[in-house]
Image (spheres, rainbow, N blue to C red):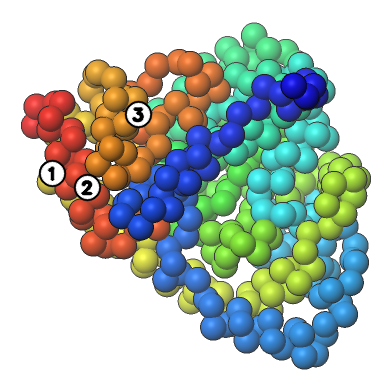
Amino acid sequence: MFAFSDRIKTLQPSAIREILKFTSYPDVISFAGGNPAPEAFPVDKIKAIMNEIMDKDPITALQYSVSEGYTPLRDWIKGDLNKKGIFNWSRDDLIITAGAQQCMEMTAKVLCNEGETIICEEPSFIGSLNSFRSYNSKLVGVPMDDEGIDPEKLEQALKDNPRTAFIYLIPNFQNPTGRTMSFERRKQVLALAYKYKTHIIEDNPYGDLRFSGDDVPAIRTMDTEGRVIYAGTFSKTVAPGLRVGYMCAEKSIIAKATCALQVSTVHTSILSQMIVHRFVTEYDFNEHLEGLRKIYGHKCDLMLTNLKLKMPQSIKFTEPDGGLFIWGTLPDGDMDYFVKKAIDRKVAIVTGKAFLVDERKPTLSFRLNYSTPTDAQIESGVDTLADVAKSIYKA
């Protein structure tokens, strides 16, 4: 038996990644992942960009570079965020990361001492939760309602945990629930961060994928104290395999994040950054985003329509305005049994326990993904889920 570090020995594999091993079988319909739709990838354009880079500027793409990231891409992102009121040229800076996931890991490394508290929405994204666990932080989950994290319970958590390093939030089309935090709730949460002198990570991987309703201003647009760290990514809008994300924060935080990056990956792939930069500048990025919104709006509507028509009415589902996920909640019973029965019928869904701070807590919820399956798979998969549900619950 090998002796592992205290930091890593209690970490468990991602429940979603484990389920995805099962979904590799060709006869399995997967509602379990969070991958972009296969038809959403701009393959031909990326291929042309890669060929152009290798023909005209191969050394820049293949050589070491600065840790902060490829300067033309950083400048483009800063300008884009500035238009949205998220980036302040005099106060802020930005670093390119290997996807938004690295932003969470670096923020924990930079701001959280061992044993300090990180407050999260509950449920929340399992990848971020595991990042925080890897630093031996104390995770505290705060329940949500349809407007986002509960402000009264958030304040109580802040009172109970005076050594809170930061609050972790996914305000837009939250993973796993698909909910969007209201503007009023965002103001309340920021006011609490000010009152208790803590930070907020505003994780926004899905914000550009709104297919219904009006945009809600980012929490960071209201931040006058530099307490909000904003994380973005091109994983859902260009390609996750490129692993290009970014962190926007007050300059001193980015300076420390740069030090953290230098002792891990040194810098994010420059080739990937160059591909993303050329894609957003040489093609119509807004037109590309509109295409993605049509794809996901259609898939979400198709899944929700089928769920409403076929599933027992006692099972409730969120109705997202964007993103990739729907959150289902059973009226009672054994959620693990429901998930197992679905998997036995070759439809993969994710147990809600995977998204809890304490996975031992009971839950009646589960997550569905509509971005990856085809239309036919959505209809067939919901048929199977309905058969399973009707064998347990009355219509």
Instruction: Name the residue located 82 percent from the left edge and 82 percent from the top edge.
Output: 58
Which structural element holds mark 3? Answer: strand
Q: Is residue 142 visible?
A: no
Amino acid of disc 3:
Ser
Instruction: Name the residue located 67 percent from the left edge and 53 percent from the top edge.
Output: 99
According to the picture, the residue beneath numbered tag 1 turns out to be 310
Is 288 positioned to the left or the right of 177 in the image?
Answer: right
Give yes or no for contact between labels 1 and 2 (Cβ–Cβ under 8 Å): yes
Q: Is residue 365 above or below residue 234?
A: above
Give yes or no for contact between labels 1 and 3 (Cβ–Cβ under 8 Å): no
Which structural element holds mark 2? Answer: helix
- Which label number is shown at residue 382? 2
Amino acid of disc 1:
Lys
Amino acid of disc 2:
Val
Residue 118 drawn at (x, y percent): 67, 24
Is 345 positioned to the left or the right of 369 in the image?
Answer: left
Q: Nearer the viewer, residue 226 or 332?
A: 332
Is 294 positioned to the left or the right of 93 in the image?
Answer: left
Q: Is residue 5 above or below residue 73?
A: above
Q: Nearer the viewer, residue 290 or 85?
A: 290
Which structural element holds mark 1? Answer: helix
Which of the marked residues, 2 or 3, is nearer the chain's N terminus? Answer: 3
According to the picture, the residue beneath numbered tag 3 turns out to be 365
Residue 10 drawn at (x, y percent): 67, 22
Instruction: Name the residue located 89 percent from the left edge and 66 percent from the top edge.
Output: 65
Which one is in front in this view, the residue at disc 2 or the one at disc 3?
2
Q: Residues within 10 Å of mark 1 (few under 14, many from 20)?
A: some
